[in-house]
Amino acid sequence: MVVLRRNFGKFFSSRLVGPLLYLVAFGWGLGRNIQVNGGNYLEFIVPGIIALGAMNTSFNAAGVNLNISRLYHKTLDEYLIAPISAAAFVSGKVLAGSVRGLIDALVILALAFLFGSRLAVNGWFFLVVLLTCFVFSSLGVVAAMLVNTHEDMANFSTFVILPMSFLCGTFFLPDSLPQVFGWIINVLPLTHASYLLRAIASGHGIIPLSLAVLAGYALILFAAGVAAVRTVRQ
Amino acid sequence: MIKISRLAKHYGSIQAVAGLDLEIDRGEIFGLLGPNGAGKTTTFRMLTMLTKPSGGSASINGYEVTGDLLKVKKVIGVVPQHMNLDQELTAWENLELHGRLHKMPGERRRQRIDELLAYVELAGRAHDLANKFSGGMKRRLMIARALMHSPGVLFLDEPTAGLDPQARRNIWDLIRRMNSEGMTVLLTTHYIEEAEALCHRVGIMDHGRLIALGTPTELKKRVGEVVVEALNHGGNEYRFFADREQALRYAGSLADNVLIREANLEDVFVELTGRKVGD
Ligand SMILES: Nc1ncnc2c1ncn2[C@@H]1O[C@H](COP(=O)(O)OP(=O)(O)OP(=O)(O)O)[C@@H](O)[C@H]1O
Ligand SMILES: [Mg+2]
């Protein structure tokens, strides 16, 4: 169930801006003189930026769009009237969101390459990116189905997605934060996505625990998405 | 074809639909009439499974709307009150998407799209974006979309709201044509003349209840076929009579300016709901 989108060019170029800014600001600007764990800062943040880019794009693509289509365009009804199961519908939305997140990640990877970072990218790397996209597309679907105004959807992004972008091991390791924060952050999915991507990119291989956490989030959020679609017919 | 029994829906303390009993036959054009907030859309949403009833039951073609979701979905076509075409897709793509959602095979899908675009007279605009269409064209496209999977019952929620007279006639013709080809049609409307011109039977809803049911002629008979409108200062006063003679006698007894005319559905409506449509 693929919903084709035009405006691909616009989507593509607007996707470039955010990561480009991060790379310029943190990679070139700030990062020139910073060393993290004995490596250069650019190499440290690129996996983080990929993780947060994948998160933002897939959350927005699946969640924000679905929320608008449910509340404003009412196009969700068209899907609810069709003889398709809730699981098929959620799969479609999550896949569509994931594809965009994946494209975003590839764009960032290409940019980072131009900036001179050399990462060890392999199959695991893409698997983790895809899993990250899947987790946040599913979260997007859940939020879109449960949140009843556009404002609250924006608030959800501000209070949940935005803090994660900055805190979850993307730009710095949470070791330096007070321990309580460290605990909270270590429970969040994006943290594990950035740890995993960083470990793979620097040639250390996968972290099984983090992979399991991500997979667990993926399963739970997907199931929650299906349940939310089922109960939306109130 | 459609059996509704004690169907009810409440939102918190609001009783949107309060125990509706109704049967609609195959091949009928049935109109639900009622003021804003009467519960027409809520009734449609329950019949099309977009909303769960709080009580009662309804079946379409023998399938319960709370049970056999997939079976019911295959036999109904729905044109909602609000425009919900995908604005970023062309007319053709909107139909294609619907066909895919209904798992129609490719060949059959393309054939049906061409057929339907011609049917609703949009063949020339197949590859224009839906948001470039006029209100009437969007409605026709939504009807075409609802017909894609060849349903036996069509639900039209205010199919002509906001359309100019020309576009409205256009939709009427389309509804009549579909009906003559065997389609059962349920529609809601605020336009009395629409119900009168189009519907075999009409149900008048108010405050979630059906307060009258019958053919337009029966309903007019019920309140009296002749109306005497007395035009006095405070506003018009209406009296209903079975025939002209009684009406004349009454009119003679009045000092005000009077108008004697045949009753229409609007009179029925006003008499039964105690307010004008749209009040
Ligand atoms: N999702 C909802 N939540 C709460 N109340 C609702 C909801 N949907 C409808 N209602 C209420 O139910 C009642 C009936 O609404 P409904 O939309 O069925 O009326 P309608 O006859 O279609 O009116 P209109 O002619 O304006 O379209 C109204 O009082 C409305 O406020
Ligand atoms: Mg309505």
Image (cartoon, coloured by chain):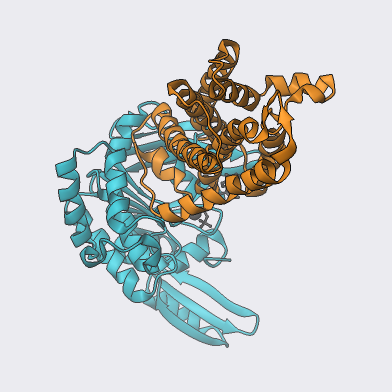
Q: Nearer the viewer, residue A122 or B277?
A: A122
Image location of residue B245, percent across then percent down = 39, 77
**Residue reaching furthest to the top:** A208
Image location of residue A174, percent across then percent down = 75, 25
Within the image, what quadrant is residue A168 found in?
top right
Q: Give the position of the N terminus of chain A as an image quadrant.
A: top left
User: Residue at 46% across / 80% down in the picture?
Assistant: B249
For residue B270, above or below residue A185: below
User: Residue at 26% across / 65% down in the picture?
Assistant: B125
Q: Nearer the viewer, residue A189 or B92?
A: A189
Q: Number of numbered discs present?
A: 0
User: Residue at 34% across / 55% down in the picture?
Assistant: B142
Q: Nearer the viewer, residue B114 or B270?
A: B114
Q: Give the position of the C terminus of chain A as an image quadrant.
A: top right
User: Residue at 64% across / 34% down in the picture?
Assistant: A45
Q: Which chain is orange?
A: A
For residue A136, above or below residue B274: above
For residue A19, above or below residue B158: above
Image location of residue B190, percent across then percent down = 46, 63
Question: Is residue B184 among the parts visible in the rendering?
Answer: no
What color is chain B drawn in? cyan
Q: Nearer the viewer, residue A180 or A234?
A: A180
B218 sits left or right of B45 in the view: left
Question: Is residue A175 among the parts visible in the rendering?
Answer: yes
